[in-house]
């Protein structure tokens, strides 16, 4: 199965409407899984304000597969990095085939790097695409 990646920043609401139900379910599922890290309201606000980009991943029939949230970050040293922050839906790791499109987008936007933020379980799939672990965040609940 092949996937198509759409950045929806310039889409009219009518074009996004057919995906609302599946997108809402995926966002809510992610928020339920990571309630301290994901807020549907904050995601929506950041996308609406242009602080983040919403990308839809669809199949060849334009059926919803997953969504991705990205943000452009400027490091302390002044370099731009495209952060891949939130990803939810079906077959997320199989979507590594779309990384070259995101890398091209990042290059055109002047980014020096692309930085997926995710779980350690993604390492094998991302390593095959040339990515390496840069940091690991540890947590201990108190």
Image (spheres, helix red, strand yellow):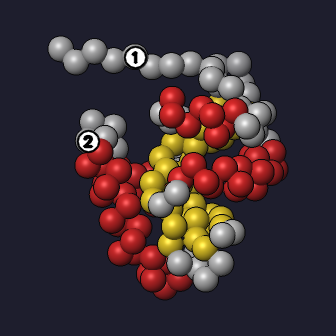
Query: Image height check: is 31 above or below 79?
Result: below
| Quarter of the image that includes the C terminus | top left
The picture places residue 77, in percent across and down from the top left corner, at 71, 19
Residue 32: give its label.
none
Query: Image height check: is 1 above or below 113?
Result: below
Q: Residue visible at 76% across and 47% down? A: 103
| Quarter of the image that includes the N terminus | bottom right
Task: Using the rendered view, name the quadrant where residue 33 is placed.
Answer: top left
**With 131 as the anchor, is 19 left or right in this view?**
left
Q: Which residue is mark 1?
A: 138
- Residue most toward the left? 142
The picture places residue 87, in percent across and down from the top left corner, at 49, 50
Tell me which numbered mark, 2 or 1, is placed earlier along the sequence. Answer: 2
Q: Which residue is mark 2?
A: 35
- Under circle 2, the secondary element is loop
- Under circle 1, the secondary element is loop
Circle 1 residues within 10 Å: few <14, some 14–19, many ≥20: few
Q: Residue visible at 70% across and 56% down? A: 98
Alpha carbon distance from label 2 to label 1: 17 Å
Q: Residue visible at 45% across and 59% down? A: 89
Q: Residue visible at 38% across and 61% down? A: 26
The picture places residue 72, in percent across and down from the top left corner, at 62, 41
Query: Image height check: is 3 above or below 117?
Result: below
Task: Using the rendered view, name the quadrant where residue 112 is placed.
Answer: top right
Q: Mark yes or no: residue 61 visible.
A: yes
Q: Are marks 2 and 1 in contact (CB under 8 Å)?
A: no
> Relative to the observer, which residue lies in front, 138 or 83?
138
Q: Mark yes or no: residue 12 visible.
A: no
């Amino acid at each position: 199965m092949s996937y198509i990646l759409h950045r929806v920043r310039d889409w009219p609401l009518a074009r996004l409407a057919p995906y609302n139900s599946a997108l809402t379910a995926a966002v809510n599922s992610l928020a339920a899984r990571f309630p301290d890290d994901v807020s549907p309201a904050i995601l929506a606000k950041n996308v609406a304000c242009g602080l983040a980009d919403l990308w839809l991943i669809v199949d060849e029939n334009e059926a919803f597969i997953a969504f991705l949230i990205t943000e452009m970050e400027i490091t302390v040293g002044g370099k731009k990095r495209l952060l891949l922050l939130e990803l939810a839906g079906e077959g997320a790791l199989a979507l590594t085939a779309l990384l070259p499109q995101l890398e091209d987008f990042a290059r055109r936007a002047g980014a020096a790097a692309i930085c997926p933020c995710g779980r350690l379980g993604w390492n094998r799939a991302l390593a095959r695409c040339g990515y390496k672990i840069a940091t690991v965040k540890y947590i201990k609940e108190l």
